[in-house]
Image (spheres, grey):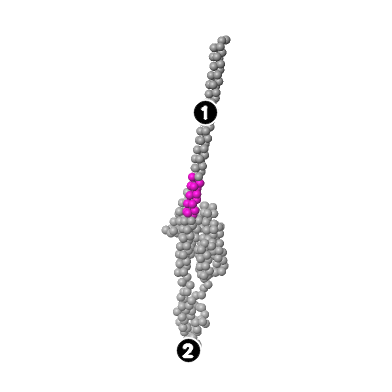
Amino acid sequence: MNVTNKTLIVLAVLLSLVMSNSVWADEAALTQRIERLERIIQGQGLVSLLGRVDQLQKEVQRLNGDNESLRHQIETMKKNQRERYLDLDQRVEKLSATATLVPVPAPVTPIIADVSEPAASAENVPAVEPAVDTAIVDNTPAPETLPVAVENGEAAYQSALQTLRSGQYEQAVMALEKFPADYPQSSYLPNAYYWQGEANYVLRDFDKAIIAFTKVVNDFPASSKVADASLKLGFSQYENGQFEVAKTTLASVVNNYPNTSAARLAKVRLDRINKESN
């Protein structure tokens, strides 16, 4: 082999080595670029994800703030409605309380007409029915009216109502539960039982609310509170999970008290129950 051939062989080997190193260098550079791009993409994705998380957190905070605002507005509306309702009830009770002093016929004592017998005083007149015998005359100078002294428990009732109005529901329940025992003949009894039910309903003690509202409906059928008590009885039964019983109670309110606010509210709750059951 001559020198020229040897030189060609050496050059060929060197060229192959250079080309191999160049390819390896190109592959290494390409790999580095790919890894760098991947890191950039991953970093951008992480930044985007973190930004999205931050945005969601801000949205949750805004919604929580809106919920708090709405809850406050609802509580304020409920409080105002309750105060107006209690105020109206108090006015009605004050009007009815004016009947605690009622005129009654003067009692008559049967006395035989005798000029020698002194006239009976108002303090000594026994409470008897007026005599009808024409042979008996009344010589007693009677006053026009006599006050009927009846302990009606108005002060205790108004005090319990004020406690309820101020939002002290547990204390109001205790006072209203004590009222029937202290004033068993009071004309405020149906109202006391009704507000017992209302206070227990607010406290979500629906068993006690049902007992109180049922007492009004069954024991005081002539009370003006019966319609509202029947309505809230149905509401309490619904909240207590007695859906079929509640439907029956609310349907009776619609039928028995048409064209009243109680009937309208009962109809709304009935529609709600029917939708939920479907």
Provide the secondary structure element on which disc 1 rests.
helix
Query: In the rendered image of this protein, does residue 276 appear above or below residue 263?
Result: above
| Residue bearing mark 2 | 115
Query: In the rendered image of this protein, does residue 30 appear above or below residue 174?
Result: above
Question: Marks 2 and 1, Cα distance to the nearest angstrom?
Answer: 142 Å
* Percent coordinates x, y for residue 13 in the rendering: 56, 17
- The verdict on residue 206 being magenta is no
Provide the secondary structure element on which disc 2 rests.
loop
Tell me, yes or no, whether the two marked residues, 2 and 1, touch with CB atoms within 8 Å: no
Residue type at mark 2 is Val
Structural crowding at the residue carrying mark 1, measured as other residues with C-alpha within 10 Å and reported as few (<14), some (14–19) or many (≥20): few
* Percent coordinates x, y for residue 150 in the rendering: 52, 73
What's the magenta bit mostly, secondary-structure-wise? helix
Figure disc tally: 2
Q: Foreground: 106 or 261?
A: 261
Q: Residue at x 54, y 12 (%)?
A: 4
| Residue bearing mark 1 | 30
Residue type at mark 1 is Leu
Q: Please tell me the numbered disc located at residue 44.
A: none
Structural crowding at the residue carrying mark 2, measured as other residues with C-alpha within 10 Å and reported as few (<14), some (14–19) or many (≥20): few
- Number of the front mark, 2 or 1: 1
Query: In the rendered image of this protein, does residue 152 appear above or below residue 9?
Result: below
Magenta-tinted stretch: 55-71
